[in-house]
């Protein structure tokens, strides 16, 4: 009887509906629990670190009727063009209830996991969906950034939903309804992602590639998909750039790019080529007469202007027009030293792609501060040994996950050269291109101020590509996945 009961239980667990439910609900639920675990800590001051101070000041500006401007010392500051508007607007929903905001960010992480799992389950089967959902659920940088009021969880959600809707509409299966509507809504979500975090702009050229390789359509149908798919993300970006031009006289989505080039890239290139200390180069850049003549660091929330980073950032925030000379000088340095620029970009890219996150030290590589004498001495206590064991367990776990991801990516790319139909070949490649660009854009600052949260936006797409590599026979194993669906690009419906 016991054996018969075990057989019945085994058959029950093999039922597609039960397994799907476990993957599509169980894994995202787990993702929520491990992200919401930060709420065990009392209070909410721990959520207000780093850039969170500026996001909250902008959120308060919106709440007090300042428009997109900082709320400083009980009054409105000038219009801001350093940040993009959606995340501060998102924070206004919570009215200062930051614990609720963290819980909502945990929910966004779980929803991102669910969306990835659902997409993969529909196209490739339950086993690949479990793999992709598990990778997103257990991504260490995503879990750690959830505890702070940072734009990453919201941007990851917007970008993932947008890209998956856009691609599912461009490459419909027989079960796909309203592909054109999916493309339009997907484009809207990608546009909102760009207004959440400037790095998401890397997704826009991928949308164009998705439509270019989306199979045979009549000329009018192709033009309609292209126009309606791109009008919202490009339109949102144009409107925001026009707003910045009107309030600050500079045609840009965000002046953060100029600050990144001026503080990270150009000094890094010069240090690489000359051997001079990067800090001394940054100090010289910060004291540039073209910038210091109008500097007003008192207008910069959360910063006091006592080092080169604060001076440069506060200059860009208080005087957006000065981002232009910063940009010109940075580009001049890069043009003068192209080899060094390529070298530090390559190293930054590899760090972001391959290097595990070290909890407690988000701004340093794994081979730095962990071995500082003070840290080594403190780790010799029992508490320190326990802490060290936990840290290295997390590092080892993420290292193993990253290895699984990249081996799966290689297997997927290798398979793509000989796979048919065309959609099975193109979809993983497009996701990989998207992930690569999202890693490449922040790669230069990652060389000197490594922060694995810059990898977060690419993780859902890398997880999907790796799943197609590890479970390349899923369409034969799972009858519900990859039926004649894969021939969809040659038989598109326009709506």
Image (tube, grey):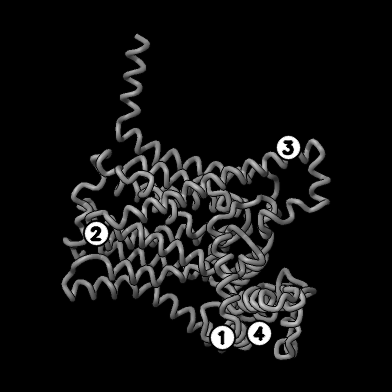
The residue identified by callout 1 is: 247
Distance in Å between CA atoms under marks 3 and 1: 53 Å
Which of marks 4 and 2 precedes in the sequence?
4
Q: Picture quarter containing residue 8?
A: top left
Say left or right for 311 vs 323. right
Q: Is label 2 or label 3 in front? A: 2
* Residue at 53% over, 82% down: 244
Q: Is mark 2 on a helix, strand or loop?
A: helix
The residue identified by callout 4 is: 319
The residue identified by callout 2 is: 422
Q: Image quadrant for the C terminus?
A: bottom left
Distance in Å between CA atoms under marks 2 and 3: 51 Å
| Residue 408 visible in this rendered orientation of the protein | yes
Q: Picture quarter containing residue 262?
A: bottom right
Classify 10 Å Cα crowding around label 4: few (below 14), some (14-19), many (20 and above): many
Q: What element carries label 3?
A: helix
């Amino acid at each position: 009887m016991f054996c018969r009961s075990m057989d019945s239980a085994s058959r029950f667990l093999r039922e597609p509906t039960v397994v799907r439910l476990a993957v599509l609900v169980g894994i995202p639920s787990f993702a929520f629990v491990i992200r919401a675990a930060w709420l065990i800590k009392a209070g909410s001051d721990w959520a207000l670190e780093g850039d969170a101070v500026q996001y909250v000041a902008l959120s308060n500006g919106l709440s007090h009727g300042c428009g997109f401007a900082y709320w400083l010392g009980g009054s409105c500051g000038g219009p801001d063009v350093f940040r993009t508007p959606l995340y501060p607007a998102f924070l206004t929903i919570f009215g200062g209830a930051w614990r609720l905001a963290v819980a909502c960010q945990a929910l966004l992480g779980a929803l991102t996991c669910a969306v990835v799992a659902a997409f993969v389950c529909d196209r490739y089967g339950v086993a690949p969906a479990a793999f992709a959902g598990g990778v997103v659920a257990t991504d260490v940088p995503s879990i750690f950034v959830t505890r702070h009021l940072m734009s990453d969880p919201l941007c990851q959600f917007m970008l993932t939903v947008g890209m998956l809707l856009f691609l599912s509409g461009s490459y419909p299966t027989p079960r796909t309804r309203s592909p054109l509507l999916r493309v339009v809504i997907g484009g809207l979500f990608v546009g909102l992602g760009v207004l959440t975090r400037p790095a998401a702009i890397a997704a826009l050229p991928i949308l164009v590639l998705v439509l270019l390789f989306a199979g045979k359509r009549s000329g009018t149908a192709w033009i309609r998909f292209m126009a309606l798919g791109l009008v919202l993300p490009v339109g949102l970006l144009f409107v925001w750039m026009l707003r910045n031009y009107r309030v600050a006289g500079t045609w840009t989505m965000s002046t953060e790019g100029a600050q990144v080039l001026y503080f990270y890239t150009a000094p890094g290139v010069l240090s690489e080529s000359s051997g001079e200390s990067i800090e001394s180069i940054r100090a010289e850049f910060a004291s540039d007469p073209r910038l210091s003549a109008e500097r007003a660091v008192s207008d910069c929330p959360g910063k006091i202007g006592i080092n080169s980073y604060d001076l440069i950032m506060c200059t860009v925030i208080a005087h957006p027009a000065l981002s232009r000379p910063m940009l010109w000088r940075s580009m001049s340095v890069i043009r003068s030293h192209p080899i060094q620029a390529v070298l530090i970009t390559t190293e930054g890219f590899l760090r972001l792609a391959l290097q595990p996150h070290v909890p407690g030290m988000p701004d340093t590589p794994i081979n730095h501060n962990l071995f500082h004498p003070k840290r080594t001495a403190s780790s010799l206590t029992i508490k320190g040994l326990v802490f060290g064991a936990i840290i290295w367990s997390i590092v080892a776990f993420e290292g193993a996950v990253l290895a699984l991801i990249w081996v799966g990516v290689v297997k997927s790319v290798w398979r793509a050269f000989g796979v048919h139909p065309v959609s099975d070949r193109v979809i993983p490649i497009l996701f990989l291109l998207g992930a690569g660009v999202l890693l490449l854009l922040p790669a230069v600052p990652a060389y000197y101020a490594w922060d694995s949260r810059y990898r977060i936006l690419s993780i859902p797409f890398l997880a999907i590509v790796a799943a197609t590599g590890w479970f390349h026979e899923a369409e034969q194993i799972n009858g519900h996945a990859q039926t004649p669906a894969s021939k969809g690009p040659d038989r598109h419906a326009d709506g």
